Amino acid sequence: MSLVAEAFVSQIAAAEPWPENATLYQQLKGEQILLSDNAASLAVQAFLQMCNLPIKVVCRANAEYMSPSGKVPFIHVGNQVVSELGPIVQFVKAKGHSLSDGLDEVQKAEMKAYMELVNNMLLTAELYLQWCDEATVGEITHARYGSPYPWPLNHILAYQKQWEVRRKMKAIGWGKKTLDQVLEDVDQCCQALSQRLGTQPYFFNKQPTELDALVFGHLYTILTTQLTSDELSEKVKNYSNLLAFCRRIEQHYFEDRVLKKHSRWYFQEWLHRTET
Amino acid sequence: MAAPLELSCWGGGWGLPSVHSESLVVMAYAKFSGAPLKVNVIDNTWRGSRGDVPILTTKDNIVSQPAKILNFLRKQKYNADYELSARQGADTLAYIALLEEKLLPAVLHTFWVENDNYFTVTKPWFASRIPFPLSLILPGRMSKGALNRILLTRGEPPLYHLREVEAQIYRDAKECLNLLSHRLGTSQFFFGDMPSTLDAYVFGFLAPLYKVRFPKVQLQEHLKQLSNLCRFCDDILNSYFRHSLGDG
């Protein structure tokens, strides 16, 4: 979006309060959504819960194509559509709600740096695992990604997406990495997050910020998603303060919703496959 | 530790020991950690390889990519982060991620994609240090690689258009520079009085942007307004690279 358009949108955003019928769109929970997209969606949901803003989650098979930037999740508020956590945080701020207003400039810099760390390492590792690891691609990703579409569209879309993701991995230097190196990077990232969190309840002590929402979205999804092997979730489980962090946010902000349903998808499929 | 460490990298200019960010990161880290590096500047003879620069060679290993080279040096006991706490180590990783996600696209654009800059400064400089006929091909390939990286990481599928992305990446880069300036404050280095890995990375990314003379300078102008970052670069150049400032 150009600078002028963004300023215009901010003005309009500021004019209206948060409506009751705000909706968040993502792919189909049970059969279609992948690990990385679910992590992103959960992060946005956590952020909005922390801001006390009501949101309804709607699942659509073509959510990716509806989104203005091609990425999920996106929110439909009033007559505006905003996608991805960064722009959504800006949008919510324009409406007068913010979790990071109490931070000073140095803390804000730290928060942004750690958010980039999660995007740079965790999200990229998730994408690598989903689209570049042959075992996961064959058993899980292809089937899930194309599931709402008839043959041959399901194969074509899945291969196209895989090609896109592999191009990106090559451009940033992850093309030649092995799975072990990627898992090493995940471990390094989790270690950094664990050290930064320490014994505090949230990353900036008493109040959660968008960084907490983002970390929760990714870690919780990694912990509760059944993949071809447990290596990824084992890396997170090594850090007990991160596990306690996820449990704490789940209890405070999601107790009225059954989040555990999310973890059933891959598990049910795996169960189904082992039975037949 | 006894084996000689040789680093192949791009050479210097405009007062810098190297104009290539990644090479500069490794050279700065070596100075900070006291690693005895023999620097082999790439010139236009056919000696040495040009791909994946900077490359560190020892008797038994060849290591490329700054992160891997720094890891290797640390294993050889050349550790500039010895004094850092665990939390500062975590902060280092986070800030390096910030540099790579927010600042690097705009730096790549300024050097390799912006036409005025690329054709008047970057391409002639690199072409003069690459033997003919490779000098006709390699700079173009590096430029395409940079454009690719920017579009794939910041562009929006399925249309990858540069114009939509340009404004956003420069805005992100300016914000990143502001954040770094806030974080540095009035300290000499990012973690107290001794330079560490983070200082090497920030120096490597900022110094070429600061010193190289470009026709299109919007990001450079913004950097020059952040006086503590400029002072940071000048301090490191004066303290650690005084002897090699003579190379062109």
Image: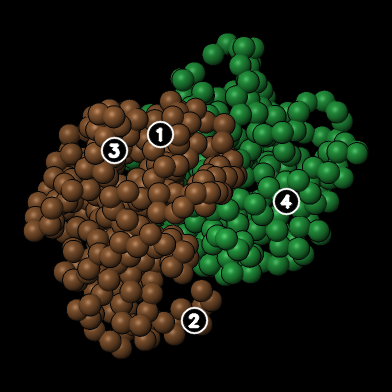
Chain colours: A brown, B green
* Residue B162, percent from left and from top: 64, 64
- Which residue is the site of mark 4? B143
Name the chain letter of the residue that bears numbered label 3.
A
Q: Secondary structure at mark 1?
A: helix
Q: Chain of mark 4?
A: B
The disc at residue A139 is 1
Q: Are marks 3 and 4 in contact (CB under 8 Å)?
A: no
Q: Are marks 1 and 2 in contact (CB under 8 Å)?
A: no
| Pick the front one: A207 or A49 | A49
First of labels 3, 2 by sequence position? 2
Residue A180 seen in this snapshot = yes
> Which residue is denoted by mark 2 in the rendering?
A5
Q: Along the horizontal axis of the image, is B3 left or right of A274?
A: right
User: Label 3, on which residue?
Assistant: A269
Residue projecting furthest to the bottom: A15
Mark 3 residue crowding within 10 angstroms, few (<14) / some (14–19) / many (20+): some
Amino acid type of the residue that numbered disc 3 sits on in the rendered structure: Glu
Q: Are marks 1 and 2 on the same chain?
A: yes
3 or 2: mark nearer the eye: 3
